[in-house]
Image (cartoon, grey):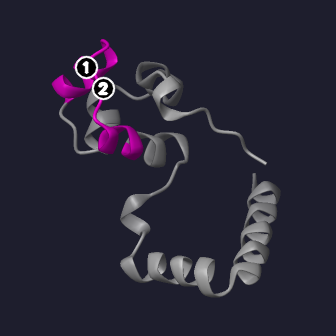
Amino acid sequence: MTIVKPIDKIDAREIRRKLGLNQQQFWSTLGVTQSGGSRYESGRNMPKPVRELLRLVHVEQIDLKAIKREDWEVVEYLKVQEPELFKSLKKSARSHAKKAA
């Protein structure tokens, strides 16, 4: 099981450097200007939507361009209507991801 630190405890500059990206590359994927990202890296308060996008894109490594509304609707349906199937599929997907890594 992967444990992710709470996003407010994660240093954006540290993540960016570990990924080997410059500020323009890192922040533009979130729709944030380089200068705005620089301010966040310098300690300015980051709005929750930006923190969540940072978590999804740069920590969880989710390609937001690949997610379709229909995909999200299927996930939500399975969670509510077929929780056991959802758990089984989730477990299988994690196992597959570990084998691929």
* Membership of 39 in magenta stretch: yes
Are the residues at dot 1 and dot 2 in contact (C-beta closer than 8 Å)? yes
Disc 2 element: helix
Q: Which residue is mark 2?
A: 23
From the viewer's perspective, is 3 left or right of 65?
right
Residue 58 rendering spot, x and y as whole percentages: 47, 41
Q: Residue placed at 36% from the left, 64% from the top?
A: 65
Name the kind of residue labelled 2 in the image. Answer: Gln
Q: Residue placed at 73% from the left, 44% from the top?
A: 2
From the viewer's perspective, is 4 left or right of 57?
right
Which residues make up the magenta segment?
34-53
Magenta region, main secondary structure: helix
Dot 2 alpha-carbon crowd within 10 angstroms: few under 14, some 14 to 19, many 20 or more: some
Image: 23 above or below 77: above
Q: Which residue is mark 1?
A: 38
Name the kind of residue labelled 1 in the image. Answer: Ser
Q: Residue placed at 52% from the left, 48% from the top?
A: 61
Residue 28 rendering spot, x and y as whole percentages: 26, 40
Question: Which residue lies most toward the bottom here?
Answer: 81
